[in-house]
Image: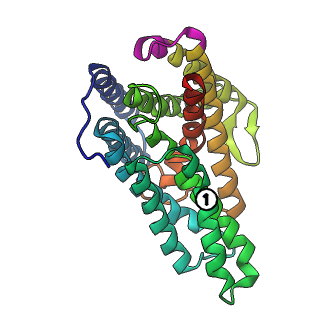
Amino acid sequence: MNLTLPPISSTVLWMIASTYLALAIGTLTRLVCLRGQSSKIARQRVYSLRSWWLVATLVCVASVGGASLAAALFAIVSMLAFREFAEFIPPRPLETYVRRFGFAFILATYVALAAGIDAQPLLASPLIGGIVVAGMLATTDRLPVFIQHVSGFMFAITITTSMPAFAVLLLQTGELPTSDGPILFLMLIGLTEANDIASALIGRRFGQRPLARKLSPMKTREGFLGGVLVTVLLAMLLGPILVSWGIGQSALAGLLIAIAATLGDLNMSAVKRCTGVKDSGDVLPGQGGVLDRIDSLTFSAPAFYLLIWWWQR
């Protein structure tokens, strides 16, 4: 496990500076737009802005701190997300000892990531955890909920840990034959968030036809297409500059992230709709829970990683 900070390239510093500049412009724009709004709405928007600054700072710190620091930060995020997801697993609540095992399992997963494990064990980790939980529950009198809790635990670990952890793999030295890990890490999260923001804004302004009426009534086809267009164009602009990709490669990366991010969002909407929950929690004021913040990344991170791996194998 390498605890020394890696050298920070000028490109990464430029990306971080651009992130904060965009955030500052967005903050000022939002504050101006809040004039005349009710105090309740204004307060909620200000809380949301604070959460955006916190999230951006954590992402930037992870990008320059190397795989070990990123794994530590993602471990906290995954444990908070798992705590929220555990409330969804029927019949509620998930057994206390299974939750505790889940927290320990998540911590062990990220310790292994910091130590340098590759994608194969990460993909297998939900199966390993499910086998252990099945053994734990099989020795109790909770057999009526055996299937729900074992399958629910495996799905929870997959969504909250294994899939977003692919972002950390981008930062591992030697995992991919490239030295652009921090750049790819920031591109992944930046394009994922850009797709979320663009699809929401465009859908709010031009949306007419629902994308998935039962899952997320506010999402529209127009918003989805607008998000895809913005993400692809942004990728085509940044790819050749940041990582020397061709226009075609950059467009494909942007398209994949946009589609995967939308599916990740809809996947979490389906989970919440099945359990009658609007927000997964209130850890991030103005934005809901941790699951609400990482839902898109749960699909975009493995999709983007596997694309990079395929290109460079």
Residue 139 visible in rendering: yes
Name above or below for residue 121 compared with residue 252.
Answer: below
Residue at point 62%, 19% (across, down): 252
Classify mark 1: residues with Cα within 10 Å, few (<14), some (14-19) or many (20+). many
Can residue 238 be found in the magenta stretch? Answer: yes
Query: Does 207 sit left or right of 165 as displayed?
Result: right
Which of the pair 2/76 is nearer the observer? 2
Residue at point 46%, 40% (across, down): 169
Which of the pair 104/145 is nearer the observer? 104
Residue 88 visible in rendering: no
Residue 281's spot in the image, x, y percent? 50, 60
Query: Does 141 sit left or right of 201 as displayed?
Result: right
Residue 313's spot in the image, x, y percent? 57, 26
Residue at point 74%, 36% (across, down): 211
Amino acid type of the residue that numbered disc 1 sits on in the rendered structure: Pro
The residue range painted magenta reads 237-248
The image's colour scheme reads rainbow
Can residue 204 be found in the magenta stretch? Answer: no
Name above or below for residue 239 compared with residue 270.
Answer: above
- For the image shown, how many numbered marks are present on the structure? 1
Residue 46's spot in the image, x, y percent? 36, 44
Which of the pair 222/179 is nearer the observer? 179
Residue 243's spot in the image, x, y percent? 44, 17
Residue at point 34%, 36% (across, down): 63
The quadrant in which residue 297 appears is: top right
Assign a secondary structure to mark 1. helix
Q: Which residue is mark 1?
A: 126
